[in-house]
Amino acid sequence: MAINLQKGQKISLTKENAGLSKIIVGLGWDEVRQSGGGGFLSALFGTQPQAIDCDASAILLKNGKYVSKDDLVFFGNLKHKSGTVNHMGDNLTGAGEGDDEQIVIDLSKVPAEYDKIVIVVNIYQAVRRRQHFGMIENAFIRLVDAKNNKEICKYNLTENYSGMTAMIFGEVYRHNGEWKFSAIGNGTTDPGIAAVCQRYV
């Protein structure tokens, strides 16, 4: 039975799940349905709102610090140089059921110098498109055992994140030889992933 986490809650991954080596981090979200839709004039003049393109990223930290641009796994760099963190590709709209984007982490092989992997989602070109997380609903992060596709835990983000353009969903981190997960759910106004990374420098 998967654990439903609350904001700030931490769970042990490897201790509770014997033999756990590879996890799938699934992230999902839906666009809030707009009422009215703008009608004939907006269709005529092409002012339909743009789909919200959320991008998931994994930031690998050494001693809690972001030290190299190689340690960012995102749509522009799908595979970490160690081969242990892999982004499964960009979803441009968030439409459809289930995970919108997935990041696969081989916990058993992550090089020892990395102690934390921060999972972040930001809205592509949020400032230019005037988009924010208040326009998104049903956002979640879930961790799945890649060996048997069994869901380990899920965290639904339920707060109002109006005005926020990026979101720190959670952290997978090493503590006393065990891998753990922390549900964070902190919104930021960072305009892009580069700015989010600067928080960890």
Image (cartoon, grey):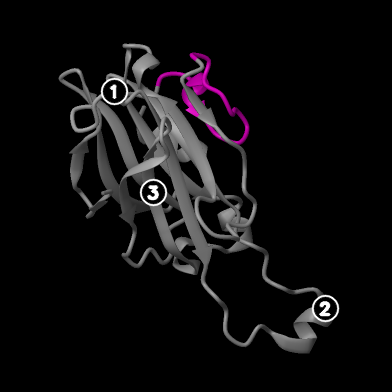
For label 1, the residue is: 19
> Which sits earlier in the primary sequence, circle 1 or circle 2?
1
Taking the image as shown, residue 16 lies to the left or right of residue 21, namely: left
What is the span of residues highlighted in magenta in the rendered image?
67-82
For label 3, the residue is: 141
Quarter of the figure with residue 158: bottom left
Q: Is residue 199 visible?
A: yes
Q: Which amino acid type is shown beneath numbered disc 1?
A: Gly
Q: Pointers 1 and 2 in contact (CB under 8 A)? A: no
Residue drawn 27% across the image and 19% down it? 63
Residue drawn 24% across the image and 31% down it? 17
Q: Which mark is residue 45?
A: 2
Q: Which amino acid type is shown beneath numbered disc 3?
A: Ile
The residue closer to the viewer here, 188 or 175, is 175
Q: Which amino acid type is shown beneath numbered disc 2?
A: Phe
Q: CA distance from mark 3 to mark 2?
A: 37 Å
